[in-house]
Each structure stands twice: as structure tokens, then as C-alpha cells.
Image (cartoon, coloured by chain):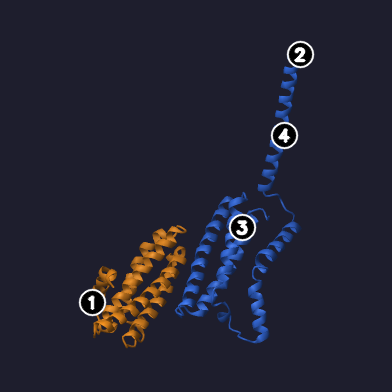
Amino acid sequence: MLEAVLNTEYLSLEVEDITAGTSQLLSSLTILIGQNSTPALTWDDSIQASIKWLFFNVILALLPLLLNLILVKIGKVTTDRAELLKDGELFFFSTSIAAASVGTLLFQIPSNLIIASVVWYCLITIIMVSTGLFALSSFLKLKKMDVIDKKVFSDSSAWCAIITIILSYFAFVQGGMK
Amino acid sequence: MNSDFEKKLRDRAKSIIRNYSIASGTASGALAIVAFLSFDTAFSISIVIKMISELAQLFGLSINDIKSTPQFKTLVQKFIVVSVSKSVISFIPVLGNVTNGVMTYYLIESIGWAVYEIFKDGRNLSDLNEEEVKSYLEHAERNKAQY
């Protein structure tokens, strides 16, 4: 009799455990899916998220350059854009912002796989181009070689940064604006 | 020309050629994925012109309007032929970049040593015909390990 009661209790405990475990597993899965899906954001939420992204990922990251620009303007050192950007600082900025966006695309389920793949490939291209050109700029500076036209170099770095910001924003949208 | 002076000249040329080959290789490696638009060739051509000018200065020669000479065009043609073969693989990130960079490095090195040999023989780029430029290039490719 006692054995039968014990067995029943054991069995009931086991069933309770399984039920609790299953519900825990389901709630975990719900959280996981919720994290990776792209919930429909309202227009206001999207704007707010975009402003946040722009401030923390672009403006703050560009602060050293902006401060340099302010100092140059105050000190009236130079007005030549090519002179300001000739060391390829914007290539460095492009690499860091593109690398973060590649990470976003890899670890979030994108809303459109084809667009996300194209953006991912373009961002990888940006990383390669900007890394190489920044290394080239440093090498030329160390060797005191004046090979590439400053204007070409600074314009390339500016375009590279603009394209990176646009692609990174696409990556941010594809990643659910998180 | 005594051997000591020749050695110093070769060492200086070696340094110039190596620096410009690294610069060109890095530019081509970076721009590998857009190599089909010949961006890397455009960068490398400006580097080659600068390298030839420095080598010419080393031998006390002055090079004016290198770009317009047919001999320079022969050197560029060599460049373009290699660029086409590079474009096939250059679309693959990392692998394409490394391949493009390494191939350009060796190509610029060959061009540099060919130009060095031309100047060492007391000749100028404008004195040579296309065949002679090609033979100097082949000679440099075969013997560059000995420099």
C-alpha cells in the first residue's frame, strides 16, 4: 500500500516536473523568438530608435574629428578639407562602424534575407577597403612617401564613411532597430 | 662604375622598389573587390609613376611625361593583363584581397627591377621599343630573387 502511494507520489512529482520544465522551455523559446523577430514598430518608435542610433553610433564616434574641425576653425589653421582628412581617419571610423553592423546582421534574424545578405557583403567590402587604405595611409606617412593625391585620398575616405553610414543604417533596420 | 658604388645604388633601388611594391600591394589588396572597375590599377599606376621617377633620380635622370610614352603603356598593358586574371578571384572577401595584394606586389617589384636594369644600362625608357621593354621585364621576373 505504502509502496503504491510512494509510486503515485513519485509519478505525480515527475509529471509536475515535466509540466514545469515544458512551460519554462516554452517561455524561454517565446523570449528567444521575441528577441529575434522584428516587431512592428510604430513610426514614432522608429524615429526615436533611428535618432538614438545616429547619435550613439555616428555622432559620438565622429567626436574626435568634429572637435578637431572646431579647433581648426577657431585657430584658423587650414580650410582645406583634403589637409584635414589626409591621414585616413574616416577609414578608421568606417571600419569600426561597419564591423559593428556586420555583427548586428550576423546575430539577429533579418526581416529580408536577400537585402541583409547584400548589405552584409557590401559592409565586408567596406571593411576590407577601409582597413587596407588606412594601413596604406599609415605606411606612406611613416615612409614619408607622397604618392597618392591628398584630395583623392580624403574624398575617398569621406565617400567611404558616407556609404558605411547608409549601409549600417540598413543593417540596423534589418536587425529590428535594436 | 665600381662595385661598392653599384652595391649602394642597388640597395637604395631595392629600398625604393620594396616600399612602392608594398604601397601598391596594399592599395590593390584593399581595392580588390572593386578591381573590376580598375580602381586598384588607377592607384597602382600613380604609384608606378612615382617609383620610376625616384629610380630615375637615383641615376641622375629626369623623367618627363612618363605617362604619354608608348614604353610606359607597355608596362601598363602588362598590368592590365594581370588585373583581368585577378578580377576573377577578387570578389571573394579576404582571399581575393590577399591574392590581389600579393600579385600586385610581385608585379610592381618586377617592373621596378626592369626599370632599374634599363637605367643601369644607361638607357632611357623613351629610347626603347616595346620588345626591349618586354625583354627587360622578363629578365627582371627571372632574376629578381638575386637582387
Give, as a three-letter code, the residue at label 2: Leu
> Split into 4 quadrants, where in the image is the C terminus of chain A?
bottom right
Which residue is rendered at x = 26% and y = 70% of the image?
B143
Please tell me the colour of chain B.
orange
Task: State the blue chain.
Answer: A
Cα distance in 3D space between marks 1 and 2: 107 Å
Q: Are marks 2 and 4 on the same chain?
A: yes
Select label 2 or label 3 by which is in front: 2
Residue position for label 1? B132
- First in residue order: circle 2 vs circle 3: 2
Select label 1 or label 2 by which is in front: 2
Residue position for label 3? A171
Judging from the image, what secondary structure is the residue with disc 3 in?
helix
Select label 4 or label 3 by which is in front: 4
- First in residue order: circle 2 vs circle 4: 2
Cα distance in 3D space between marks 4 and 3: 34 Å
